[in-house]
Image: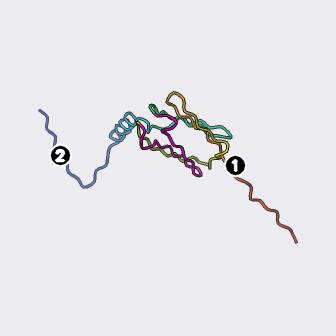
């Protein structure tokens, strides 16, 4: 048998391989909480999320500024609650949501900020 002494310290600092193992476990068992597949072009972002077992009626997508919130309703088979913050505000008029075969695809238009430039008369 092999015995190792137990060290008791007031401050525990995890080692690098401890953090790597924790990341592996979180990614392996997180399910729908994994990061979405994100594609970007000049005018929009496209987010693809796996939401198996949920229908259109079970999901709610809310957009507020640059934040997208995806929630399942209380009576849904599965419960999810996700939020993603994008680097720029989202244009609701050019955005679209589609659910096919358990994959929620959000095409979110980038809101182009209106120019606030005014000309000043020189005296």
Q: Is residue 40 magenta?
A: no
For the N terminus, the image quarter is: top left
Q: Element at badge 2?
A: loop
Q: Nearer the viewer, residue 86 or 63?
A: 63
Q: Nearer the viewer, residue 79 or 31?
A: 79
Relative placement, left or right, of 103 versus 75 is right
Q: How many marks?
A: 2
Q: Which residues are magenta?
A: 54-76
Q: Is residue 115 placed above or below 60 in the rendered structure?
A: below
Q: Nearer the viewer, residue 32 or 70?
A: 70
Distance between the alpha carbons at the discs numbered 2 and 1: 59 Å
- Label 1 environment density (alpha carbons within 10 Å; few <14, some 14–19, many ≥20): few
Outermost residue on the bottom side: it is 123
Relative placement, left or right, of 94 versus 80 is right
For the C terminus, the image quarter is: bottom right
Residue wearing tag 1: 112
Q: Element at badge 1?
A: loop
Q: Earlier in the sequence, mark 2 or mark 1?
A: 2
Question: Residue 81: image x %, image y %?
Answer: 45, 44
Residue wearing tag 2: 6
Question: Residue 103: image x %, image y %?
Answer: 51, 31
At x 28% / y 54%, what residue is drawn?
11
Q: Is residue 58 magenta?
A: yes
Q: Nearer the viewer, residue 118 or 103?
A: 103
What label sits on residue 17 in the rendered view? Answer: none
Question: Residue 50: image x %, image y %?
Answer: 48, 33
Outermost residue on the right side: it is 123
């Amino acid at each position: 048998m092999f015995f190792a002494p137990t060290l008791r310290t007031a401050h525990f600092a995890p080692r690098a391989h401890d953090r790597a193992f924790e990341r592996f476990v979180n990614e392996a068992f997180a399910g729908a909480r994994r990061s979405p597949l994100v594609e970007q072009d000049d005018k929009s972002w496209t987010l693809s999320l796996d939401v198996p077992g949920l229908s259109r009626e079970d999901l709610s997508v809310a957009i507020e500024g640059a934040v997208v919130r995806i929630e399942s309703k209380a009576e849904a088979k599965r419960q999810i609650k996700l939020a993603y913050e994008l680097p720029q505000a989202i244009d609701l008029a050019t955005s679209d949501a589609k659910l096919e075969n358990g994959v929620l695809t959000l095409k979110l238009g980038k809101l182009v900020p209106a120019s606030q430039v005014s000309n000043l008369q020189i005296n």
